[in-house]
Image (spheres, rainbow, N blue to C red):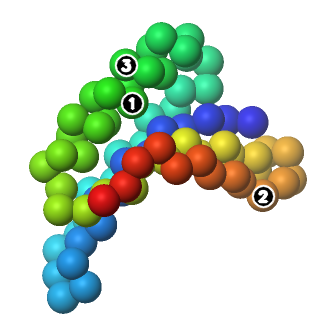
Amino acid sequence: MRVHLELIEVLPPASTATPDFIRVDVTDWSQDDVNTAIQLLMQQAQVYQGYILRVHYCRHDEGRPCAFALLGSR
């Protein structure tokens, strides 16, 4: 299983811009490093009008569906 942190910019419905998407593979990282990455992504999220920050548990290699845990949103 791979573990990713994902920050997804949520744009207003009328927007024609392409939203930002940041994915960081933290599979083999220490918990301290993961926490630091979460803090940095939260700082980046503050420039967005809307965002979703989540953990993506990717299980495609195991033939199973992915799972997600929401860390923050606006």
Residue 37 picture quarter: top left
Numbered tag placed on residue 14 in the rendering: none
Sort mark 1 into few (<14), some (14-19) or many (20+) by Cα contacts within 10 Å.
many
Q: Amino acid at mark 3?
A: Thr
**Quarter in which the C terminus is drawn:** bottom left
62 over 37 or under it: above or below: below
Give the residue at x 61% y 26%: 27
> Mark 2 or mark 3, which is nearer to you?
3
Instruction: Name the residue beneath numbered marker 2.
Output: 65
**Cβ atoms under marks 1 and 3 closer than 8 Å:** yes
Badge 2 or badge 3: first in the primary sequence: 3
Badge 1 or badge 2: first in the primary sequence: 1
Instruction: Name the residue beneath numbered marker 3.
Output: 36
**Of residues 50 and 19, the one drawn nearer to the viewer in this rendering:** 50
Give the residue at x 13% y 49%: 47
> Mark 1 or mark 2, which is nearer to you?
1
Classify mark 1: helix, strand or loop: helix
Left or right side of 8 for 28: right
Give the residue at x 48% y 39%: 5
Instruction: Name the residue beneath numbered marker 1.
Output: 38
CA distance separating discs 1 and 3: 5 Å
Residue 4 picture quarter: top right
CA distance separating discs 2 and 3: 27 Å
**Quarter in which the N terminus is drawn:** top right
Classify mark 3: helix, strand or loop: helix
Residue 50: percent from the left, percent from the top? 25, 62
**Cβ atoms under marks 1 and 2 closer than 8 Å:** no
CA distance separating discs 1 and 2: 24 Å
> Residue most toward the right?
63
Residue 55: percent from the left, percent from the top? 55, 42
Give the residue at x 48% y 11%: 32
